[in-house]
């Protein structure tokens, strides 16, 4: 094994990040590229070692991965020792359904290599986990697996509905339905410009949606009248991590405000990030904002605990989306097991979420 | 198992009560009671032979009984059918924000109340300010369909004391509330107060079944006592009599070979320190110079089991169940942080289930048996020697290198945060269920055999 410049001491953990790597030209780790630089920095500061690899380069004898070469200041490919812990940042759900991925997980199990987050979670399984907890139910919008009859039933109860792919992320392919005066308006998150003429009740809506949904498995969810900030939709992203001692902690909270006149607030869809205390205090007053923020953290932690207890495999990082309606009530909107890293400020320092991930990796190695 | 019955309400203006068909001696019943409300009424077994309770709306209203679709218990005494029980959970620190009515403890209480269906009781949370003494009603905080709801109910059958701290408990309003509920209304009150560390040891000393678990423990009195303990045990622990979370715990070690004294502790900045002195006086003067030594406890040091050089101790919870018997409800191992005096999580400690700690199943079983026996023995001894009705206790226990079990502390209002650990979640659920199940037991006792409770 060549270990000319990749340093690893037997007493210090070797931590690896699994993701897709673009090797045309300089190696590029996609959305987590700068995050990998931070992880390298943080882990070397503690004396450990870090590298990045993709699924196809893993073998039981070692891994062909990229480590950060301090001398050349470049990510450098080498044949590297098996890691102690792998942090999964595969960005494609399809990859995680592949036979190669399943085989890989079985290998890790045999080798005793720790692995988190286990995989993408589907919106429907998350909903089922949370519904089992009586104390969380009132925070969940009514949700069903999509079907024509579910559509019909939900249209009777709510004026606003969302249809979301069970395996979707980043606000892609979401359909919004709003009904007023017997007309149902259809909007799409992926095609903001496209205008679909409104439907009459029983006027072929189900057929039109079937076309939009294609073969994707979807959920249909009660729309919540979220409080708006200057006329723009707002929700909150609470990033939670399991610490070295296996307890969930809140790492950061941001308010995400949508681009104007758009119904999803994902940053990937052009929204912006604000301080939660500031937005809440402006809308609800300081005293109420204090409670809302506290409840938001408590709710996020309960959600993270519930999901990680029920989901297969090990989960140590979750992004929880919580909304607040116009009356000030909190709603659990979504949980994401591959949360974006782009909400925190990034100065020269290592961000709290990077520290939290490293802390957890070290905790796993101690056990 | 006691039987629980669904309760149904029907629109009917004439006082109508059907009772479960399988109830014996039902034709003698002349009254129906809910909490402390009592209503003379004629009852009949369910005409279709169903095992349900049916009340007409007017009866429901007179009894102030909420419709929460929770199956309930029935107790019969002196021609009265008691439906319930209604369990009042007393606490303080209510907020004006309806989504988080009990502040940061709202989630804890929401989870506690959520076990109502499996227990078969109507638990609610209330504070001293929610009692209407004239009407005999309480604005109770119920957790219904996943949300908080305030409902007017009669005084409960039992009160479960969850006051958050000693300071609140000492308030005169709460002291008189407690006296009034117990003496004027004969409502059993369980889990009162907070144990004092020293008091627990002094009382346990009285019972020979407990003595084997007790390390020598004294209030600080003199250096000579400490010197003697150090020469007997090699090390002692010095800790505040009323401390918690492992704050202010010091370990003092004496090295017979070189005559030096060492003090291991966590300093103001949270750094674990080990400092060396050539006399005990110097050590005490330097380390405890601004502390009131008479508020400190000196305890025999135990050579605990270790895992990779780290100290291990155990948190064991016991609860009284629906038959009034002590049960082991939860057990967890705590492993100290590197170089730490204590195993507390905020001191770098980690929590594990016994399965995780012991690779050898036989070893795990032996350890579990010993801890269970110790905790159950200590529970019944403590119950005998302390005032009030005790329904749950949290123990900090250790096992030394020879396999002997030791008691470090017993807590009447034990924290539950360590049971948030993923592997310990079932324990969390069990302690919640048992703490309300014991309320069912007490309610029945207060109805059918009050003389056993109020002596």
Image (cartoon, coloured by chain):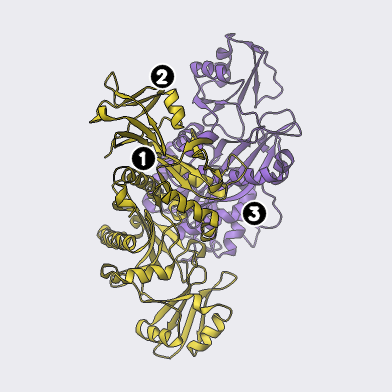
Chain colours: A purple, B yellow
Report the front residue among B7 and A198.
B7
Residue B430 lies, in percent from the top left, at: 36, 47
Residue A145 lies, in percent from the top left, at: 49, 25
Question: Mark 3 packing: few (<14 Cα in 10 Å), some, or many (20+)?
Answer: some
Disc assigned to residue B14: 2
Of circles 2 and 1, the one toward us is 2
Q: Do the residues labelled 2 and 1 touch (CB within 8 Å)?
A: no
Does residue B33 appear in the picture of this structure? yes
**Chain assignment, label 1:** B
Residue B100 lies, in percent from the top left, at: 58, 43
Report the front residue among B326 and A174.
B326
Residue drawn at 49 percent across, 16 percent down: A149
User: What residue is disc 3 on?
Assistant: A351
Residue with the most extreme left position: B24
Of circles 1 and 3, the one toward us is 1
**Chain assignment, label 2:** B
| Marks 1/3 same chain | no
Which of the marked residues, 2 or 1, is nearer the chain's N terminus? 2
Is the residue B51 above or below the residue A304 in the image? Answer: above
Question: Mark 1 packing: few (<14 Cα in 10 Å), some, or many (20+)?
Answer: many
């Amino acid at each position: 094994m060549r270990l000319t410049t990749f340093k690893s001491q037997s007493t210090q953990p070797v931590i690896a990040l699994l993701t897709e790597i673009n090797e045309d030209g300089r190696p590029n780790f996609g959305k987590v590229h700068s995050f990998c630089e931070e992880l390298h920095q943080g882990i070397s500061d503690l004396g450990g070692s870090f590298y990045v690899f993709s699924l196809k380069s893993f073998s039981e004898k070692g891994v062909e991965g990229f480590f950060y070469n301090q001398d050349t200041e470049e990510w450098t490919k080498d044949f590297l020792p098996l890691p102690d812990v792998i942090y999964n940042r595969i960005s494609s759900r399809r990859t995680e359904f592949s036979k190669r991925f399943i085989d890989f997980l079985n290998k890790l199990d045999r080798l005793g290599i720790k692995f988190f987050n286990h995989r993408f979670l589907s919106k429907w399984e998350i909903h089922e986990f949370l519904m089992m907890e009586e104390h969380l139910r009132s925070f969940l919008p009514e949700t069903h697996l999509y079907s024509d009859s579910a559509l019909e039933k939900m249209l009777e109860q709510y004026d606003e509905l969302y249809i979301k792919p069970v395996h979707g992320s980043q606000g892609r392919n979401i359909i919004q339905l709003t009904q007023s005066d017997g007309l149902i308006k259809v909007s799409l998150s992926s095609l903001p410009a496209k205008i679909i003429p409104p439907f009459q009740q029983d006027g072929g809506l189900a057929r039109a949606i079937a076309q939009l949904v294609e073969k994707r498995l979807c959920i249909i969810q009660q729309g919540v009248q979220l409080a708006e900030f200057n006329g723009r939709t707002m929700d909150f992203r609470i990033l939670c991590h399991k610490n070295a001692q296996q307890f969930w902690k809140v790492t950061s909270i941001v308010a995400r405000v949508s681009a104007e006149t758009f119904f999803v607030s994902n940053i990937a869809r052009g929204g912006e990030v604000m301080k939660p205390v500031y937005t809440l205090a402006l809308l609800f007053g300081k005293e109420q904002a204090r409670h809302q923020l506290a409840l938001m953290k408590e709710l996020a932690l309960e959600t993270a605990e519930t999901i990680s207890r029920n989901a297969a495999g090990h989960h140590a990082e979750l992004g929880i989306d919580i909304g607040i309606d116009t009356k000030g009530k909190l709603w659990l909107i979504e949980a994401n097991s591959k949360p974006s890293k782009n909400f925190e400020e990034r100065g020269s320092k290592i961000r709290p979420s990077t520290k939290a991930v490293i802390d957890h990796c070290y905790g796993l190695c101690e056990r | 198992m006691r039987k629980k019955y669904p309760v149904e309400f029907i629109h009917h203006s004439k006082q109508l009560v059907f009772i479960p068909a399988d109830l014996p001696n039902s034709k003698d019943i002349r009254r129906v009671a809910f909490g402390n409300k009592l209503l003379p009424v004629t009852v009949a077994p369910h005409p279709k032979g169903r095992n349900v309770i049916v009340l007409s709306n007017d009866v429901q209203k007179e009894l102030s009984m909420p419709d929460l679709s929770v199956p309930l218990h029935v107790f019969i005494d002196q021609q009265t059918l008691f439906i319930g029980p209604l369990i009042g959970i007393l606490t303080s620190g209510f907020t004006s924000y309806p989504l988080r009515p009990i502040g940061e403890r709202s989630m804890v209480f929401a989870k506690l109340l959520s076990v109502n269906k499996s227990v078969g009781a109507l638990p609610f949370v209330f504070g001293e300010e929610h009692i209407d003494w004239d009407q005999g009603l309480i604005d109770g905080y119920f957790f219904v369909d996943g949300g908080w709801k305030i409902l007017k109910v009669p005084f409960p059958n039992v009160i479960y004391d969850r006051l958050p701290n000693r300071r609140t408990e000492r308030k005169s309003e709460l002291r008189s509330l407690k006296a009034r509920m117990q003496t004027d209304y004969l409502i059993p009150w369980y889990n009162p107060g907070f144990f004092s560390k020293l008091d627990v040891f002094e009382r346990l000393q009285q019972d020979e079944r407990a003595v084997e678990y007790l390390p020598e423990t004294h209030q600080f009195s003199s250096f000579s006592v400490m010197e003697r303990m150090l020469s007997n045990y090699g090390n002692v622990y010095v800790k505040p009599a009323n401390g918690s979370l492992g704050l202010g715990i010091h370990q003092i070690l004496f090295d017979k070979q070189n005559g030096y004294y060492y003090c291991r502790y966590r300093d103001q900045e949270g750094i674990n320190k080990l400092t060396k002195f050539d006399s005990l006086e110097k050590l005490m003067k330097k380390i405890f110079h601004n502390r009131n030594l008479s508020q400190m406890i000196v305890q025999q040091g135990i050579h605990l089991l270790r895992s990779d050089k780290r100290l291990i101790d155990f948190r064991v919870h016991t609860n009284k169940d629906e038959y009034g018997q002590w049960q082991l409800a939860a057990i967890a191992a705590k492993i100290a942080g590197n170089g730490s005096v204590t195993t507390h999580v905020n001191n770098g400690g980690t929590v594990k289930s016994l399965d995780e700690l012991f690779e050898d199943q036989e070893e795990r079983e032996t350890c579990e048996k010993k801890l269970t026996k110790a905790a159950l023995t200590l529970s019944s001894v403590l119950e005998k020697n302390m005032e009030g009705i005790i329904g749950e206790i949290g123990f900090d226990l250790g096992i030394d290198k020879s396999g002997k079990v030791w008691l470090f502390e017993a807590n009447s209002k034990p924290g539950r945060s360590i049971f948030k650990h993923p592997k310990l979640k079932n324990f969390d659920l069990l302690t919640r269920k048992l703490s309300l199940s014991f309320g069912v037991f007490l309610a029945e006792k207060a109805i059918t055999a009050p003389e056993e409770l109020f002596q």
